[in-house]
Amino acid sequence: SAVISQKPSRDICQRGTSLTIQCQVDSQVTMMFWYRQQPGQSLTLIATANQGSEATYESGFVIDKFPISRPNLTFSTLTVSNMSPEDSSIYLCSVGQVGAGELFFGEGSRLTVL
Amino acid sequence: AQSVTQLDSHVSVSEGTPVLLRCNYSSSYSPSLFWYVQHPNKGLQLLLKYTSAATLVKGINGFEAEFKKSETSFHLTKPSAHMSDAAEYFCAVSGGGADGLTFGKGTHLIIQP
């Protein structure tokens, strides 16, 4: 398994601002993903963070709103841009190795937008 | 495309009694299936996984699940519930390759003393 650290663990933000969430892994991983978990809901995949290239976004999520970087095999960032109260969620970084199947998750970043 | 359906949004059992959390899947491929647990204000922890080996899979904390292809099911069981098992449980499916997991809506497990 991998140890995944996310920062910040929680934040309260004002409408219209942007917040960048960091995900640091203690080992090199081939796959990194960002998920959103809205209050009381399941997890929805936002995008696959591809090392050295643009992220691959799921339907309903766009790069302008959720820009993602992945400069190397152990680190990624997700930015939530121009936030509104509807963006209040837990954002989770997850990692895995191709062929292994399972993903491991960070503790999440709990975002509240006022 | 793949999907999972968790048949119960809430399950309530008494401490010491068996637990059954139900999950059905749909997949165009030979799926890999997973159960995760999420305790309040925590991330997801992997309980167990099925990846086309033994159909009865044992996980952590006394949980196990059985893959039944004929029923497209992957139900999670535990013989005797403990108060610490109270949490949200998610079933997930992978189509393989480099795709992420698709999660069910979750089952909230309540343990009555």
Image: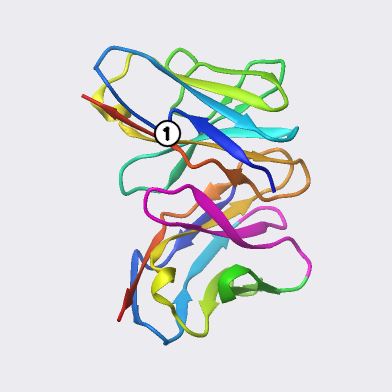
Residue A103 picture location, percent across and down: 63, 46
The number of numbered badges drawn on the structure is: 1
- Residue annotated with mark 1: A9
- Residue drawn at the location 68% of the way across and 43% of the way down: A2
Residue B42 picture location, percent across and down: 44, 49
Most extreme residue toward the left is: A114
Q: Is residue A84 left or right of residue B66?
A: left
- Residue drawn at the location 56% of the way across and 35% of the way down: A5
Q: Residues within 10 Å of mark 1 (few under 14, many from 20)?
A: some
Q: Compared to B20, does A65 lie above or below?
A: above
Which quarter of the rendering shows the C terminus of chain B? bottom left
What is the secondary structure assignment of the residue under circle 1? loop
- Residue drawn at the location 64% of the way across and 39% of the way down: A95
Q: Compared to A95, does B45 lie above or below?
A: below
- Whether residue B89 appears in magenta in the rendering, the answer is no
Which chain does the residue under circle 1 lie in? A
- Whether residue B50 appears in magenta in the rendering, the answer is yes
Residue A111 picture location, percent across and down: 34, 30
- Residue drawn at the location 61% of the way across and 68% of the way down: B60
Q: Is residue A27 left or right of residue A37?
A: right
Q: Compared to B71, does A87 lie above or below?
A: above
Q: Which residues are magenta?
A: B27-53
Residue B53 picture location, percent across and down: 79, 67
Along the line of sight, which residue is nearer the eye, A105 or B51? A105
Amino acid at pointer 1: Ser
Q: Quadrant of residue A50?
A: top right
